[in-house]
Image (cartoon, rainbow, N blue to C red):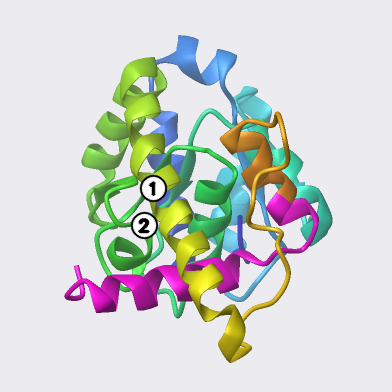
Amino acid sequence: VGTLEPRKNLAAAIRSYADVPERLRRDIPLVVVGRRGWLSDQVEGMIRAGKTSGWLRFLGFVPQTHLPAIYAGARLFVYPSRYEGFGLPVVEAMASGVPVVTSSVSCLPEISGDGAELVHPDDVDGLRATLERLLGDDARRAQLDEPVQRHFDVAGGFRQQRRGDGVAGGGALEHQRGESAVVARQRRLAEGDHAVRLAVELRQQRVGQGGR
């Protein structure tokens, strides 16, 4: 998810996925979402090759309101970006209950905490191995969601404490009666309870805990 441009390092994701065993690629295609950006000719060629081979789906630009459904249908979210100012797609994926594989550089380790598998953006072999392992390991994917749930619970608590200061209003963070945590997080995104705000709160909470 994101503009097709060099810093997003989509080429590494495609190269890595091309080396995942064919049975996994056939059962679980790589889905690419994003509009064309600068210097995207090479990655567009790779996208065409993956589509022709049958293991890649390219959706192009997708409206923000449709992203929760796409995240919800994913087995994994892979985001090997070289640089991010904030890393919003990672937060959106985590908010949707999707296990995340992202880069060990820029702000991404901070924003994902212990709720993601981290790989250096230049380590294509390591990324391939991580994707292959997680796609076949239901237990590990479930483990990744546990700290994510804690993070969003912490963010919700912080928001409750800060309401009187006017930082955030409304009660969208609370679960509706009878819905699961994943459904609640999906609803928060779909209703416009922005992942940016959650991530800001999470960062502030981590600073209060010593910047972990």
> Image height check: is 164 above or below 211?
below
Q: Please tell me in which quadrant of the rendered image residue 140 appears.
A: top left
In percent of width and height, residue 161 lies at 49, 74
Circle count: 2
Residue at image coords 29%, 23%? 133
Magenta stretch prevailing secondary structure: helix
Nearer to me, 211 or 99? 211
Q: In which quarter of the image is the C terminus?
A: bottom left
Nearer to me, 58 or 201? 201
In percent of width and height, residue 197 lies at 58, 73
> Image height check: is 80 above or below 55?
below
Q: In this view, does 32 lie to the left or right of 208?
A: right
Nearer to me, 90 or 158? 158
Residue 112: mark in rendering: 2
Q: What secondary structure is marked by label 2? A: helix
- Check the image and name the residue furthest to the top: 23
Q: What stretch is highlighted in magenta?
A: 188-212
Residue 132: mark in rendering: none
Other residues around mark 1 within 10 Å, as few (<14) / some (14–19) / many (≥20)? few
In percent of width and height, residue 38 lies at 61, 76
Q: What secondary structure is marked by label 1? A: helix
Residue 150: mark in rendering: 1
Residue at image coords 43%, 74%? 84
Q: Please tell me in which quadrant of the rendered image residue 92 appears.
A: bottom right
Q: Quadrant of the N terminus?
A: bottom right
**Measured Cα–Cα span from mark 1 to mark 2:** 12 Å
Q: Please tell me in which quadrant of the rendered image residue 130 appears.
A: top left
Residue at image coords 63%, 79%? 168
> Image height check: is 190 above or below 36?
above
- Residue type indicated by callout 1: Arg
- Residue type indicated by callout 2: Ser
